[in-house]
Amino acid sequence: MKHIHFFWRDGMDHVKSILLCAMCSAVLLAGSGYAQNLLTNGDFASSLTGWTVASADPLAAAVAIGNGNPDPGLYLSRGTNSAQILPNGVGQVIPVVPGRKYQVRGQWSGMIMGRNSIGDPNGTTLAEVNVTFLPTAGTPYTGEGAPSVAMQIKKRWAYPGDNPSYTFGVDPATGGWAWEPIGLSSRTGDSESIVAPDGMNFMAVWTNFACSVGNTSTTVYARIDDLQVMSCQGFVVQDLNSDCKVNFADFSVFANAWLTCGRDPATKCWN
Ligand SMILES: [Ca+2]
Ligand SMILES: [Ca+2]
């Protein structure tokens, strides 16, 4: 049970807190959480229900339920060398309205530093979350005839000496990254503002995990969870948790930061 505390000053630097009331906590809980998620089972609580598994690579690519944030979550991995064959992951197609704006969010973590006999580390491993708009629900979103990717979020392992921007926050020493919002790695397009084009009535959200240049002695993987597509036509600054509505959940964010002060020196905070 999350409690909300109000803080106020008592003298120059003394802060006290009180528990406001159990009823307010109940209201806050009721007002928290995600905006309507247009995806089915984006938190993978129902295993892979709603998702189409596409693990097309014949060489040990795998899609499974693994550790999530919280469990369970989508687990994509591969353990042996192969050429990239799209896709390796899961996808879901949802109806959209041309001209409307959409946001794609989620969390991921992983380890994408491959190893093989050529060198250690080696390999070019990448993890992606892609959005492709489709004219019909049956239009393929990968392969020949597929429309181009409209928005791509990507993590890629880079050889030492490669452009460091390729790695997008991947630790060069370990190949890993801890749970973080997928939008931090937006590569093509803006994951917070994706507009469905004219004639495109469906959106495919699909993941891909590939390794193109050798990976024979370790398992590389990406964990993906909390995938969400929402359609917000405009955010206001008071929407502190960015769920496209202003309510007690935003008030909670504000109250939890009450009397936070970062002034330097700290003696300037309350004078
Ligand atoms: Ca989950
Ligand atoms: Ca809000």
Image: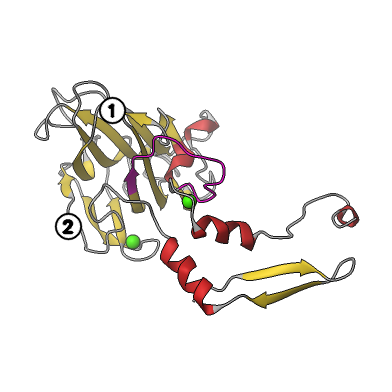
Q: Does 126 appear above or below 14? A: above
Instruction: List x then y, in percent, for residue 225.
Output: 35, 55
User: Count of labels shown?
Assistant: 2
Residue located at (52% from left, 47% from top): 239
The residue singled out by tag 1 in the image is 196
Residue located at (24% from left, 56% from top): 41
**Taking 155 as reference, is 60 left or right?**
left
Question: Image quadrant for the C terminus?
Answer: bottom right
What's the amino acid at mark 2?
A: Thr
Instruction: List x then y, in percent, for residue 243.
Output: 43, 49
The residue singled out by tag 2 in the image is 49
Q: Is residue 218 visible?
A: no
Residue 80, numbered circle: none
- Residue 118, quarter of picture: top left
The boundaries of the magenta stretch are 228-242
Q: Does 38 appear above or below 163? A: below
Q: Does 208 appear above or below 6? A: above
Instruction: List x then y, in percent, for residue 248.
Output: 51, 60
Secondary structure predominantly adopted by residues drawn in magenta: loop
Q: Is 240 inside the magenta-drawn segment? A: yes
